[in-house]
Structure formats: C-alpha cells, structure tokens
Image (cartoon, rainbow, N blue to C red):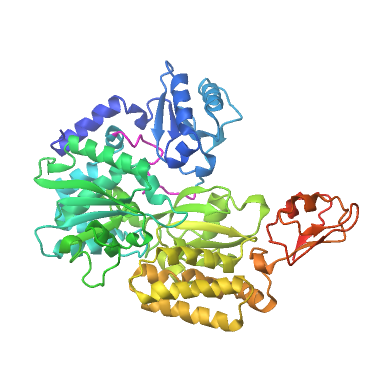
Amino acid sequence: MISSGAELNAYKNKVLAGGSKYVSGECDVVYVGMATCGIAAGAEAVFDALNAEVQGRGVVVVPTGCIGMCYAEPLVEIKKQGKPSVFVSGADAETARKVVAEYLDGGDSSAVLPDTRGDKQTRIALRNCGVIDPTKIDDYIAVGGYEALAKVLTEMGREGVISEMKKSGLRGRGGAGFSTGLKWEFGAKSEGAKKYIICNADEGDPGAFMDRSILEGDPHSVLEAMAIAAFAVGADEGIFYIRAEYPLAVKRLETAIAQATELGLLGDNIMGTGFDFKLSISLGAGAFVCGEETALLNSLEGKRGEPRLRPPFPAQKGLWDKPTVNNNVETYANIPAIILRGADWFRSVGTEKCPGTKVFALAGKINNVGLVEVPMGTTLREIVYEIGGGLPDGKAFKAIQTGGPSGGCIPAQHLDMGVDYESLGSIGSMMGSGGMIVMDEDDCMVNIAKFYLDFTMEESCGKCTPCRIGNTRLHEILEKITDGNGTEDDLTQLKDLAQTIKSTSLCGLGNSAPNPVLSTLHFFADEYLAHVNEKKCPSHTCKNLIRYIITEKCIGCGICAKVCPVNCISGEPKKLHSIDQSRCIKCGECLPKCPSKVGAIVIE
C-alpha cells in the first residue's frame, strides 16, 4: 500500500531499478504495438517470437498500446541505446524476429524504417501510449504516474486545482469544447453530500478510435485524472461508461482499477489524506445517442438512452439527481500532465482560445491511417499531407469530414485553415470527438451526405420530432436525388428542412445531424445541380445516374459478356459489343475485365 507522497516516490525509484528500468532508457527495448489494431494484424505472434529471440540479450520486449502508425501494423519499435528509434512494420513473426535480431546485433537492416510520425506532432494525451506496458501499474508510476494526484491531495487544495484547470484553458475534447475548469467549478459549488464523476467512453462516431486507443494504451492516466476531478468537486464515486464493443479497453480498465485499488491509489483514505474515491465500470450497448451526456445519465440509471432538457445541467443535477461532472477520455488524459507541468506550460501549446493539442483518428482515403496528436491550430494540409502522407494512388483531395457523422465536409479551398473549435464551426463543421475522414476525387458528395445521414437517422433516439421525422425526410430527399428523380425544388426543401432540424432538435446530436447536408450543399452545389439538372453523377458513384458504354475501341474479345451476371452484353466475336442499358444493373464487373491495353469500356 502507498500511503503517502513520499512512499509513492520511493515506490517509483524501486520500479525504475527493477522490472521497469527500460522506461528510463537503461537498456535496449523492443516495443510491440498490441492495441486492437495491432492484435488484429497478428501482433501476438510477433510478440511471442521476439520474446524468444531476445532471451539472454539483456533486451526487454514490451507489449504497448497503439503507437499511432496503424497503417503499419503489426508494428515493432526498436530503441537501441545510442541510436534513434526505428520500426519494423507489417512483418510476420519470423520476419520480425530476424530483422530485430540483425539490428540489435549491430546491423543496419534495410527492413527497419525511421520514425514517420513527423515533427508536427506533440504528444500530451498520448504521451504514454506506445511507451509503457498498459497492463502494469509499475510502468505508469515509473513515468510519473499518480504524482499529480499526490500533488493535488497534499499541496494544491480543491480551489487550487480548479483555478489551475481554468487557467490552463483546457476545453472538453468530446465535442462542444466547454471549459473543463468551469465545469468542475460548477460541480464544486453545487450543493449535495453525494456527487459523481463520470468518464464518457461511449465513442460512437464512425472512423473514430481515439478514446479506445488511450484506454488500451494508458488507462491509469484516466483513472488518476478522474480521482483529481473527484477531489476538486467533492465526489467520492466515479463511473466509466464504455461501450461493450471495446473488450480490450474494458479488460485493461478492469486491470488498472484493481491494481490502483490494491496499491491504495483508489479506494479509502488515498495516500493517507482522508480522501475516498471508488471507481466502477458500466457497459453501454453501443447507442450513438448515449455519447450525449444526459442520455448517458439516463442509460446509467437503467432508463432509455434519451437526452434530458437542460437546464438543470448535470453539474447541478445529474446522475440520480446528484451533482455530476462528466468528461470524455481524452479530456481526462490531459489533466495529470497539466497538474505536474502547470497551466502556463499547457497554454504554450496550441492557440490562445484553444490551448493544448487534439488527438485525431485519421482514416479514409489517406496513406498513413492512424492516430495523430497535433497542437491546436495545425492546418488541415499539414495533417493530411505531412503527417498523413497524402492520398493513395495519386488521387486528388476532395474533402475531409471532421467531427464524425455530425460534422461537415471541408473542401480543398480550406486546407490551409488551422484546426480549432471556432475555425471549424465557422465553415459549418465541428471538432467533435476527433474523427477525420479523407475523401478523394472518386467520392460523390451527395452520396457522402446520404451515407452520414443514414447513420444519424438510424441512431436517433426518437424523442424529438425534428430529429426523428426530419432526418428521415432529409434522407428520402437525398435518395430521390441520387436515384435521378430530384429537382431544384428538392434542393431548396433540403436546405430549409436541414436548417429547421438544426435549430429545433432537443440535443446536440440532433442539432448537428444536418451538418453533412448543409456543408455539401454549400461547398459542392455543382454536384447537386448535376444530379438534379443533368441527371449525372460527376464522380460516377450513384448507380442510377451512370451508364457503362462500350466504345469503338472494342476488339470483340467477349470477356465482358462472360463476366456479366445478367447477360446484358452481346456481340459477335471480333466485332463491337454493346450493353443493353435496360437490363444493366450497374455492377461494374465488366470494367476491370476489359483488357487494359484496350480500355473499351467507359463510364458516362
């Protein structure tokens, strides 16, 4: 049991001299990324092979969380003393074993890669991901874990903690960007002997995996931050609300809570200060709406996941009508670093209105899919091209969706815009939890809007009419347009209805659901007009608006006719073939089968 700050420091020195000495760089170390992405790619076999290989070498093999370069999984990082880190990516167990052995023996294997994460990144929330074993509390303590908690309990006091958080300017990283310090202050000032601290880990945006990766790679940082928040507002109980679809994150959270409780860093009389704080986990069923904090509270109470009217706000009247402070995973992950290094240090990163960094899950038509953490104000161009490595196959950038299904689609003309809450909001998008999905020249923006609306329509809780009925009507109009039956009157109705839903829905999810429609209408109006006036899809995506045509280049090989599933292609050998458009199902099977040197089939 650690019963004081002095004992915590002594325990740290002990682990640095023992099993966690690699944290301080005192030996060669091989990290294997074993978050969900790494395990899915085969990292467990790689880890076992490397463990066998390094026996007797004085080298430690460490299973870590997500290193960030998800496109390169399974990913191995080699830190040899006196040399910069190098990586082995995408290798099977045997190949990784051979390459690591060669490099550790002093070779310069061509199979190792330099760190491609780039100098644009600054890791605060992700500072320990890929650096420690997330299943060992000793590793977390070795890098300064729980020292922030000791500091607030013994030096700062509740008002001091809240003052420092307000001074830092940390804004909630879950979407709205509200001041974390102010939220805590409201919770502290609310009357009541019983208060709650909630961690919102219900990450439901398509393409978003920031919170999951933090919990899989550094769960103790979030536990420590929740304890700090509880001390600041006067709470003695905390709850993790996490979706059941995150089994690895749940497992590592359970392990972390048990370890911290065993050492006396959670539970009763923490560090001998008289402060009590206990944590439990509640599994959500995966409803997108439960990412909205009041719907989350209803779910915790066993009710239908629907948003509540506000005010009163949760900090005043939340779970079981008790004052409740709710932050998301990434917000909490920043807090121990702010407490230890100070608000001024945190404000030195990012912008004046948006200090610090933001973690983004970069996905879609991008070479370097993965997690990135950049200072607020970093431009979209820097994220897409310098960190993300640009688009595959030399395709042209068309748009980037920020903020998940509730965000907007941002065109190339805004690539040099710095990313922060206000800038994104000014052009009809939002920060959201941090998803970024890149689209290229082959994406139809009308179809993209329909895709995201399909998600939000299905995930609507149904409590308010604008969201329940309005989004369904929006989706029907978009289907009409992509089917080739749209008119310019439909475009007017689409915009008017979207604006009505945005201004009248009950919760933030309903308010933001029309954003993909409004942003694509604004920035890609020409595509909508092509669909309704010319009955064409410029990106050749909407099946009812395209035709496969066999041109005069046809040599009559008959390959296309053989692969057509509905036998709508006819013609004699060595003569021009044709497609019966009335029977063609637009499956596209014929296009790639036409000999590349001929290229007789085109899309109109």
Residue depicted at 48% across the width and 29% down the height: 46
Residue 70 is situated, as x and y percent measured from the top left of the image, at 50, 43
Main SS category, magenta section: loop
Q: Quadrant of residue 62?
A: top left
Residue interval drawn in magenta: 120-136
Depth order, front residue of 468/565: 565
Q: Quadrant of the N terminus?
A: top left
Residue depicted at 24% across the width and 57% down the height: 300
Residue 567 is situated, as x and y percent measured from the top left of the image, at 75, 56
Depth order, front residue of 212/287: 287
User: Is any atom of residue 321 visible in this view?
Assistant: yes
Q: In the figure, is residue 507 to the left or right of 234?
A: right
Q: In the figure, is residue 348 to the left or right of 545?
A: left
Residue 276 is situated, as x and y percent measured from the top left of the image, at 12, 47
Vertical arrangement, residue 432 with respect to residue 371, above or below: below
Q: Quadrant of residue 184?
A: bottom left
Depth order, front residue of 337/426: 426
Residue 122 magenta-highlighted? yes
Vertical arrangement, residue 364 with respect to residue 21, above or below: below
Residue 125 magenta-highlighted? yes
Q: How many marks?
A: 0
Q: In the figure, is residue 66 to the left or right of 321?
A: right
Residue depicted at 58% across the width and 59% down the height: 439
The residue lying furthest to the top in this view is 56
Residue 195 is situated, as x and y percent measured from the top left of the image, at 15, 57
The residue lying furthest to the right in this view is 574
Q: Quadrant of the C terminus?
A: bottom right
User: Is any atom of residue 126 visible in this view?
Assistant: no
Depth order, front residue of 572/499: 572
Q: In the figure, is residue 290 to the left or right of 112?
A: left
Residue depicted at 83% across the width and 51% down the height: 558
